[in-house]
C-alpha cells in the first residue's frame, strides 16, 4: 500500500523540478558572465599596463631631457673656461721663461722687478 504524500512534500518536489529546469540555463549564463568578466579583466589590465608604461616612459624622457639640458649648460660653461685656461698656460710658460732669465741677471731685486715689468710680465700696481 502506498502511503499518501503530504501537500508539503508534493510542493517541495515540484519546487525542486522547477529549480533544476531554471538552474541549467542560469548556470550557463553564469559561466558566460564569468568568461566575459575574465576577458574584461585581462583587457583592463593590458590597457592599464600600457598606460602605466607610457606614463613611466614620459617621466623618464622628461628627466632625461632635464639632465641633458643641465649637462649641456655645464659643458658650455666648461668650454667657456677653456680659452682663458689656454691663455693662462701660455702666460705661465712665458713667465717661467722670463723668471729664468731674471734669475741669471746680476743686480739687486729692484732691477730684476723692473726688467720683468719691461717684458710685461709684472704689474707693479699690485706690488
Image (spheres, helix red, strand yellow):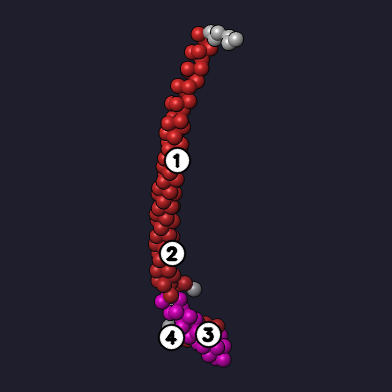
Q: Which secondary structure dominates the residues rendered in magenta? A: helix
| Label disc, if present, on residue 56 of the rendered structure | none
Q: Residues within 10 Å of mark 4 (few under 14, many from 20)?
A: few
First along the sequence among labels 1 and 4: 1
Using the image as rendered, state which of residue 41 and residue 88 is in the foreground: 41
Residue occupying image coordinates x 40% and y 69%: 76
Give the CA distance from mark 1 to mark 4: 97 Å
| Label disc, if present, on residue 71 of the rendered structure | 2
Q: Secondary structure at mark 1?
A: helix
Indicate which label's residue lies in the foreground, 2 or 1. 1
Q: Is residue 110 visible?
A: yes
Give the CA distance from mark 3 to mark 2: 36 Å
Q: Residues within 10 Å of mark 1 (few under 14, many from 20)?
A: few
Residue occupying image coordinates x 52% and y 85%: 96
Q: Is residue 2 above or below residue 43?
A: above
State yes or no: residue 13 in magenta: no
Q: Which residue is mark 3?
A: 96
Q: Secondary structure at mark 4?
A: helix
Indicate which label's residue lies in the foreground, 4 or 2. 2
First along the sequence among labels 4 and 2: 2
Give the CA distance from mark 2 to mark 1: 53 Å
Q: Which residue is mark 1?
A: 35
Q: Residues within 10 Å of mark 2 (few under 14, many from 20)?
A: few
First along the sequence among labels 1 and 3: 1
Q: Which residue is mark 4?
A: 118
Q: Is residue 16 above or below residue 122?
A: above
Q: Is residue 112 visible?
A: no
Residue occupying image coordinates x 50% and y 20%: 16
Answer yes or no: do the residues labelled 2 and 1 have beta carbons within 8 Å? no
Q: Which residues are magenta?
A: 83-108
Residue 109 on image: x %, y %: 55, 83
Indicate which label's residue lies in the foreground, 3 or 2. 2
Amino acid at each position: 500500500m502506498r502511503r499518501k504524500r503530504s501537500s508539503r512534500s508534493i510542493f517541495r518536489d515540484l519546487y525542486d523540478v522547477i529549480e533544476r529546469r531554471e538552474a541549467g540555463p542560469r548556470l550557463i549564463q553564469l559561466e558566460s558572465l564569468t568568461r566575459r568578466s575574465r576577458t574584461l579583466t585581462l583587457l583592463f589590465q593590458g590597457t592599464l599596463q600600457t598606460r602605466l608604461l607610457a606614463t613611466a616612459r614620459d617621466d623618464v624622457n622628461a628627466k632625461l631631457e632635464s639632465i641633458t639640458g643641465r649637462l649641456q649648460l655645464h659643458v658650455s660653461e666648461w668650454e667657456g673656461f677653456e680659452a682663458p685656461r689656454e691663455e693662462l698656460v701660455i702666460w705661465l710658460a712665458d713667465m717661467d721663461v722670463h723668471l729664468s732669465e731674471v734669475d741669471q741677471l746680476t743686480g739687486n731685486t729692484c732691477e730684476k722687478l723692473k726688467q720683468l715689468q719691461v717684458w710685461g710680465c709684472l704689474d707693479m700696481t699690485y706690488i
